[in-house]
Image: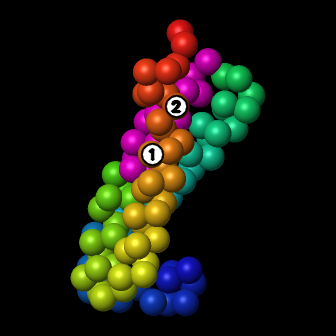
């Protein structure tokens, strides 16, 4: 959304840093999509890729709110907190003690 509205000042002030950040987020999104499709198709490697991509997502959901808090955008930072909780909810079944082997 910010890219389309040309509202990312770092594209001018820190293009390499923001470029790497955006690339990491696009890779995260792509891996989440690929792992989701692989799970649907019952690929044997899907679960490992899912956990890896969810780890990437959890990292970005922890790191990204800092940018918005620094900009004074508390509502957007709060959105990341909500998304973080949802991500943990998606991971919880795989790490709970109630899972049968």
Labels in figure, total = 2
Q: Nearer the viewer, residue 66 or 88?
A: 88
- Label 1 and label 2: CA atoms lie apart by 9 Å
* Residue 2 in sight from this viewpoint: yes
For the residue labelled by badge 2, is the local secondary structure a helix, a strand or a loop? helix
Q: Identify the residue at horizontal 50%, vertical 21% (top origin).
A: 98
Q: What stretch is highlighted in magenta?
A: 44-58
Please report the residue visible at 60 percent of the width from the left and 37 percent of the height from the top.
35
Please check the rendered image and state whether residue 55 is part of the magenta-colored stretch, yes or no: yes
**Residue shown at 53%/9% (left/top)?**
101
Sequence-first disc among 1 and 2: 1
Residue 74, percent from left and from top:
36, 82
17 with respect to 58 (left or right): left
Residue 80 position (above or below residue 9): above
Q: Quadrant of residue 70?
A: bottom left
Q: How crowded is mark 1: few (under 14 residues within 10 Å), some or many (20 or more)?
A: few
Q: Is residue 4 above or below residue 17?
A: below
Q: Identify the residue at the far right of this view.
A: 41
Residue 59 spot, x, y in % from top left: 34, 52
Q: Where is residue 8 shown, x and y percent of the image?
A: 41, 85
> Main structural element of the magenta stretch: helix, strand or loop?
helix
Instruction: Judge left or right: residue 4 versus residue 54.
Output: right
Q: Mark 2 points at which residue?
A: 93
37 up-or-down from 95: above or below:
below
Q: Nearer the viewer, residue 84 or 22?
A: 84
Which residue is at the front of the view, 100 or 7? 100
The verdict on residue 23 being magenta is no
Characterize the local packing of mark 2: few (<14), some (14-19) or many (20 or more) Cα atoms within 10 angstroms: few
* Tag 1 and tag 2, C-beta contact below 8 Å: no
Label 1 sits on residue: 88
In the displayed structure image, the side of residue 40 where residue 44 appears, left or right: left
Tell me the quarter of the image containing the N terminus: bottom right
């Amino acid at each position: 959304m910010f890219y389309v509205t040309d509202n990312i000042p770092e594209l001018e002030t820190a293009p390499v840093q923001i470029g790497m950040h955006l690339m990491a987020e696009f890779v995260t999104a792509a891996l989440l999509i690929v792992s989701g499709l692989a799970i649907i198709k019952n690929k044997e490697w899907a679960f490992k890729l899912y956990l890896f991509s969810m780890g990437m997502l959890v990292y970005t959901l922890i790191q990204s709110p800092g940018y918005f808090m620094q900009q004074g955008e508390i509502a957007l930072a709060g959105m990341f907190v909500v998304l973080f909780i949802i991500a943990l909810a998606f991971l919880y079944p795989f790490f709970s003690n109630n899972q049968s082997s």
